[in-house]
Image (tube, rainbow, N blue to C red):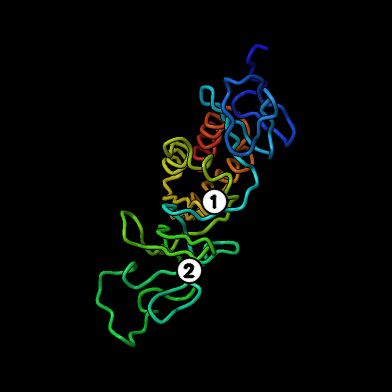
Amino acid sequence: MTDTLLVKDKDVVVPGETLAQGMSFVPSTGMYRDGENIIAAKIGLVSVEGKVIKIVPLADPYVPKVGDIVIGEVNDVLFSGWRVGLKGPYSAVLGVKDATSDFIGRGVDLTQYFALGEYVLCKIINVTSQKLIDITLRGQGLRKLNGGRLLAVNPAKVPRIIGREGTMTKMIQDATKTEIVVGQNGVVWLNGDPHNEVIATAAIRMVEQNAHKSGLTQTMKTWLDEQVKGGR
């Protein structure tokens, strides 16, 4: 049998669909080998890198991982830190030592630093098997997020919203002159002129809804040019 790839890059596939035939192709997560066939085990977007086939899921929930940059909401003040919601069932603990370099004495009102309902851009530094999560604000760009607006997106679409090496987000930022931060947990923060924030929000929604389509970058560039020119 000749090794054959039966799908194209960015094709949408469903469970049970044969992706390739032959032993030279390498299956990744979201698929399995049945004899010489590679079969999809979940719905998603195909990514082909040489002989390696991957499936980017279209609807998987966020699973926290060490190293992820996420946006969370402060929802409780603890004895020595804060509890931060990360969207969905997950929350994390931000300890004082990972939040600030200030010396904080016993009994200090921690809401002076982070109050309930405030949002932070943070990094996950520990995840236990019981999904107990620790985060830090020590790192470049990590901080409290002041002003702006928040947008919830499907975490599975985050890589497409960011784009390869950040190209999609940068394109939307540059066109709308809006600062955009995309958390791996599917929370997006936008900060700019209110009119441009609306355009940037619509652009992100378009990417989210059309993540499986080819030629999306050019489509978005054309759309953004029209929107920005129309607002002048």
Rendering coords of residue 220 (x, y %)? 54, 34
Which mark's residue is nearer the viewer, 2 or 1? 2
Camera-nearest residue between 93 and 229: 93
Q: Where 209 falls versus 48 (above or below)?
A: below
Residue topped by disc 2: 84
Camera-nearest residue between 111 and 18: 18
Amino acid type assigned to the residue bearing label 1 in the image: Val
Amino acid type assigned to the residue bearing label 2 in the image: Val
Secondary structure under tag 1 reads helix
Q: Where 124 falls versus 21 (above or below)?
A: below
Label placed on residue 59: none
Rendering coords of residue 13 (x, y %)? 69, 32
Give the side of residue 59 with respect to residue 227, left or right: right
Label placed on residue 198: 1
Residue lying at 48% horizontally and 53% vertically, measured from the top left: 65
- Quadrant into which the N terminus falls: top right
What residue occupies the far right of the structure in this picture? 16
Rendering coords of residue 83 (x, y %)? 47, 72
Rendering coords of residue 176 (x, y %)? 46, 44
Callout 2–callout 1 Cβ contact below 8 Å: no
What residue occupies the far top of the structure in this picture? 2
Give the side of residue 11 with respect to residue 65, left or right: right
Camera-nearest residue between 193 and 88: 88
Secondary structure under tag 2 reads strand
Disc 2 to disc 1, C-alpha distance? 27 Å
Mark 2 closeness class: few <14, some 14–19, many ≥20 residues within 10 Å: many
Give the side of residue 193 with respect to residue 21, left or right: left
Residue lying at 31% horizontally and 86% vertically, measured from the top left: 106
What residue occupies the far front of the structure in this picture? 35
Q: Where 13 falls versus 130 (above or below)?
A: above
Q: Quadrant of residue 6?
A: top right
